[in-house]
Amino acid sequence: MPTKTRIVGIGNSRGIRIAKTLLDEADLPEEVELRAERGRLVVQAVRHARSGWATAAKRMRARNDDRLLDEPTSTKFDREQWEWQ
């Protein structure tokens, strides 16, 4: 349900107060990201890069779907100069 609030001055910045009930309903964590869209500000939970990749990789492995699409190829450098340490 929409809630009205005002944009207030906070030092040199501006801010809004968000009611606890609204935050609880949104189930947002402490860390959020803000994005400006035309006529609105969007507040959403921070999505960390590669979030969920480990779980997806385990599911792929369980389905035997974690194979390379192409055969590995080696170059002259790989064959003649590369040394594993």
Image (cartoon, helix red, strand yellow):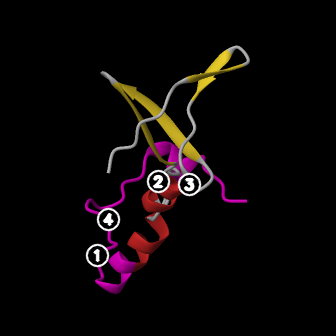
| Distance CA(mark 4)–CA(mark 2) | 46 Å
Q: Position of residue 11 (x, y in %)?
A: 73, 18
Within-10-Å neighbours for mark 1: few <14, some 14–19, many 20+: few
In this image, 59 relative to 81: left or right? left
Secondary structure of residue under mark 4: loop
Pointer 4: what residue? 68
**Amino acid type, label 4:** Leu
Q: In front of the other: label 4 or label 1? A: 1
- For residue 64, which quarter of the picture? bottom left
Within-10-Å neighbours for mark 3: few <14, some 14–19, many 20+: few
Pointer 3: what residue? 20
Q: In front of the other: label 2 or label 1? A: 2
| Distance CA(mark 2)–CA(mark 1) | 42 Å
Asked if the residue under mark 3 is in contact with the one under mark 4, i.e. CB atoms within 8 Å, the reply is: no
Q: Quadrant of the C terminus?
A: bottom right
Q: Earlier in the sequence, mark 4 or mark 2?
A: 2
Region of the chain picked out in magenta, as a range: 59-85
Q: Earlier in the sequence, mark 4 or mark 3?
A: 3
Within-10-Å neighbours for mark 4: few <14, some 14–19, many 20+: few
- The extreme top residue here reads 12
**Amino acid type, label 1:** Asp
Pointer 2: what residue? 22
Asked if the residue under mark 2 is in contact with the one under mark 3, i.e. CB atoms within 8 Å, the reply is: yes
